[in-house]
Amino acid sequence: MTPAIQIEQIHKSFGPLSALNNINLSIEQGEFFALLGPNGAGKSTLINLLAGLLRPTSGRLAVMGHDVVEDYRNARRCLGVVPQELVFDPFFTVREMLRFQSGYFGLGPENDPWIDEVIDNLGLTDKAHTNMRRLSGGMKRRALIAQALAHRPPVLVLDEPTAGVDVELRQLLWQFIQRLNREGMTIILTTHYLEEAETLCSRVAMLKQGEVVALDSTENLLKRVPGKKLRLKLGSASLPQSLSHLLRSQDADTFTLALNEAAEIEMVLAELRATNIRVEELQLIEPDLEDVFMEIVRA
Amino acid sequence: MRGVWTLFKKEILRFWKVSFQTVAAPVITALLYLLIFSHVLEKHVEVYPGISYTAFLIPGLMMMSLLQNSFANSSSSLIQAKVMGNIVFLLLTPLAYWEIFLAFLAAAILRGVVVGFAVWLVALFYVDLPLAHPWLILAFAVLGGALLGALGIIAGIWAEKFDQMAAFQNFIIMPLSFLSGVFYSIHSLPPVWQKLSHLNPFFYMIDGFRYGFFGSGDMDPAISLTVVGISFLLLSWLTLHLLKCGYKLRG
């Protein structure tokens, strides 16, 4: 099957600054894929290259097998992009704007039922006839997502869609996007909320300084960080000397220790008992994507 | 062609939704020029024999309004979309560079012609204008609107903020249109200024357009039409080139 996204040896420079360096990435159809990395890692540059907003210095990108430069018309028909910034056209209502957007892609009234479905699923029905300018931030965000979906693209890129969005909208959004993904849409997500990437995405690429530094299934990435973390709230503001090598962070009387295996808990508790320190709370934490991210970014 | 049609429709609705500002305001401005200049000069100036100064002034004002509004349509649409950031929704579409050009150009021509026509309708209350060569009037209106529409696209692509757009408008469009013979015949100017006026493409648009009404002018309308046509082709080539290479639009 043709990959949804094929990125081969992509380099992108802005003058002397190299923003992306030899990126190779293939995303299969139907994947829910996360693109992670610290600010300035090149995530948005990569998305803009896919969308044709930027042109690569060298290399090749294809969406559903269509080269984004040579065959840009078909590549763009296959791609929906939700930009990071809350941008909107202040002249039109939500429905007008969605009809225009679908018209630019060559679609006419036959696409109206889909537009209604998108409006409905994103909770925009009450606002369909409201001018974009009058929408709240959250509603504008929904309208942006609707705009990217207006031409029913098989591949959807969401560039930090939940930045500054409340819990209710986040849940509504993810339910809808997960449904689209189940129906076959390929989803590519960049986010700063690593929890979201961990719950939603089956595969993750991590970028650092314009290079892919990790590319694996979420499951395998989580296995990269050995051991677990033990969080203890103690009846003392200091930890016995014998445990200090395990300490990762401390917040007043709450200590986070890194363990290689769960069995080490017994040793920790024994040491605390020996020094007469009372354990008030105890929590064993599995490593999450944030730990993996921090480890890779720090490396 | 549905994509081009949609963009054209959007560009028309964009100005139509604020028609007080985009149609009514320029008509009022033209009407004020007409009232003031005809009041002051009607009894003192006769540019062409048998044609009153008010009648002489009206085609010039119509064309000036047409040109300025054609320019304003494409340039303001682009600069607003760039400053607001919503230009991405256009750049993400499969529309080709020449399709974007066509839609913006057609909408610019339409806005210019609507404003010019509205000035004419209002002016009918003052003077009954002859229509010596209606096809020439139409040809100059469409070509003039197209030329300024293309110039508006160039300005919209080039300007990064409203200040730069205002500079383009005030330092290029305004002087060229005011010094083009809207209010006078260039034959009344000293020889040096007459020669300089011949370098101004706005002069040919105004003079040719006026010729369409009265059947007389400062220049042979065939020459004017050729100059305007060649200027339009050159500007179109430049506009298409900028859009194709994505100058200031795609990095």
Image: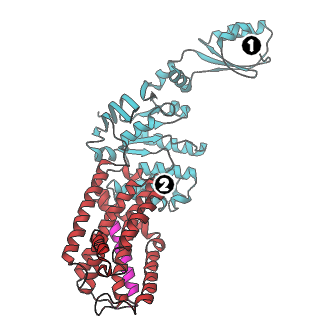
Chain colours: A cyan, B red
Asked if the residue at tag 2 contacts the one at tag 1, i.e. Cβ–Cβ closer than 8 Å, the answer is no
Can you say whether A246 is above or below A174 in the image?
Answer: above
Mark nearer the N terminus (1 vs 2): 2
Chain bearing tag 2 is: A
Which span is picked out in magenta? B107-128
Residue name at image x 28 percent, y 68 percent: B199
- Is label 1 in a helix, a strand or a loop? loop
**Does B113 appear in magenta?**
yes
> Along the line of sight, which residue is nearer the eye, A220 or A71?
A71
On the image, numbered disc 1 is attached to which residue?
Answer: A239
Task: Place residue A202 in its image quadrant.
Answer: top left
How crowded pointer 2 is (Cα within 10 Å; few <14, some 14-19, many 20+) is rated as: many
Could one spot residue B5 in this view of the protein? no
Residue topped by disc 2: A88
Query: Which quadrant of the figure has residue B222?
Result: bottom left
Give me the residue at 47% from left, 62% from top: A92
Residue B6, image x, y percentages: 35, 61
The quadrant of the rendering that contains the N terminus of chain A is top left
Q: Is residue B156 above or below residue A239?
A: below
**Residue B167: where, in percent of width, then height?**
44, 61
The reply, left or right, for residue A145 in relation to residue B242 is: right
Dominant SS of magenta comes to: helix
Query: What amino acid type is highlighted by mark number 2?
Result: Phe
Which residue shows up at 44% across the image and 56% down it? Answer: B81
Give the answer, above or below, for where B49 lies relative to A269. Answer: below
Image location (x, y in percent) of residue B45: 36, 89
Q: Tell me the SS state at disc 2.
A: loop
Give the side of residue A244 with respect to residue A95, left or right: right
Q: Position of residue B140 (x, y in %)?
A: 26, 74
